[in-house]
Amino acid sequence: MTFHAAGESTDGETRGPERALALILLGPPGAGKGTQARQLVDRYGIPQISTGDMLREAVAQGTPLGKQAQGCMDRGELVADDVIIGLVGERLERDDARQGFLFDGFPRTIPQAEALDGLLSKMGRRLTRVVLLEVPAEVVVERNSARRSCPQCQETYHLLNRPPARDCLCDRCGVELVQRPDDHEDVIRNRMTVYGVQTSPLAEYYRRRGLLSEVDGQRAVDVVFGDVTQAVDAAQ
Ligand code: AMP
């Protein structure tokens, strides 16, 4: 993967703050948000802000936040809104977020979306686009059960559709791939219920504001990526 300086897209163009992209990827667990996000980072030169990755890092490091979040994550429940909003508020203050960002896994509740509106308006920013990746429930269960990820670079694989070149080793780092504890079937089902109750109302929240693009996430990664970038480019 190529890394670009904040605000520098793949064509080398630097974006001024007035054109800064502020994107959200919405969708159920396993819809492909992480995979799309990593490609979008390359294309637009903006950082991916994944609250799930930030929480997993905190758990791995045994920080107070990690200890507080771990139980909820293991059960497939959401971490408290005020914790997440605090985390995102701090993350947005970092230099690399000044010229744009892409949220993956945030917001997940209406209060989080409202808090984000407040944070953005304080920064004089507004959302560019919210892309909803739509994938039916049965596909979600199958995708999550077969998902493996690299504990080092977070790259994700699918044991059948996108297996690593060498048995269970990351193509990039050579590190042994792991299954996320919350990708076991019972926890996935709980995460889907939580998604339906707490997160899916966000589609309507953003649709009403004219910000939502719906993309069929069941197709090949590159085809989905084409539709996602088309939605983003049309909104700029
Ligand atoms: P993800 O990697 O986005 O699927 O997130 C993994 C887990 O982290 C979720 O099941 C939640 O327990 C927690 N989490 C991640 N993002 C959020 C969020 N925005 N709000 C609440 N909990 C979150």
Image (cartoon, rainbow, N blue to C red):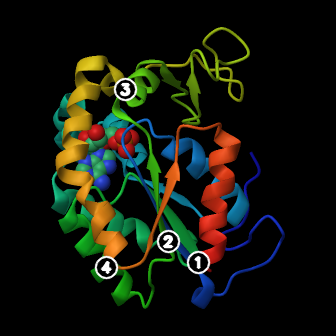
Image coords of residue 65 (percent x, y): 24, 47
Alpha-carbon distance for marks 2 and 3?
27 Å
- First-in-chain label (1 vs 2): 2
Q: Indicate the quadrant containing the C terminus: top left, top right, bottom left or bottom right.
A: bottom right
As rendered, which of 119 and 129 lies closer to the eye? 129
SS for callout 2: strand
Alpha-carbon distance for marks 1 and 2?
7 Å
Q: Is residue 14 left or right of residue 148?
A: right
- First-in-chain label (3 vs 4): 4
Instruction: Quadrant for residue 88, please give it.
Output: bottom left
The residue singled out by tag 2 in the image is: 129
Identify residue type, mark 1: Ala
Instruction: Quadrant for residue 184, please give it.
Output: top left
As rendered, which of 188 and 82 lies closer to the eye? 188
Q: Residues within 10 Å of mark 2 (few under 14, many from 20)?
A: many
Alpha-carbon distance for marks 4 and 1?
18 Å
Q: Residues within 10 Å of mark 1 (few under 14, many from 20)?
A: some
Alpha-carbon distance for marks 2 and 4?
13 Å
- First-in-chain label (1 vs 3): 3
Q: Name which residue lies at 66% across and 87% down.
A: 16
Identify residue type, mark 3: Glu
The residue singled out by tag 3 in the image is: 138
Q: Can residue 160 be seen at all in this image of the molecule?
A: yes
Say whether marks 1 and 2 touch (CB < 8 Å).
Answer: yes
Q: Is residue 38 above or below residue 152?
A: below
The residue singled out by tag 1 in the image is: 235
The residue singled out by tag 4 in the image is: 117
Identify residue type, mark 2: Arg
Q: Is residue 117 left or right of residue 230?
A: left
Q: Is mark 3 within 8 Å of ligand 1?
A: no
As rendered, which of 135 and 120 lies closer to the eye? 135
Q: Of the residues tagged 2 and 4, which is closer to the observer?
A: 2
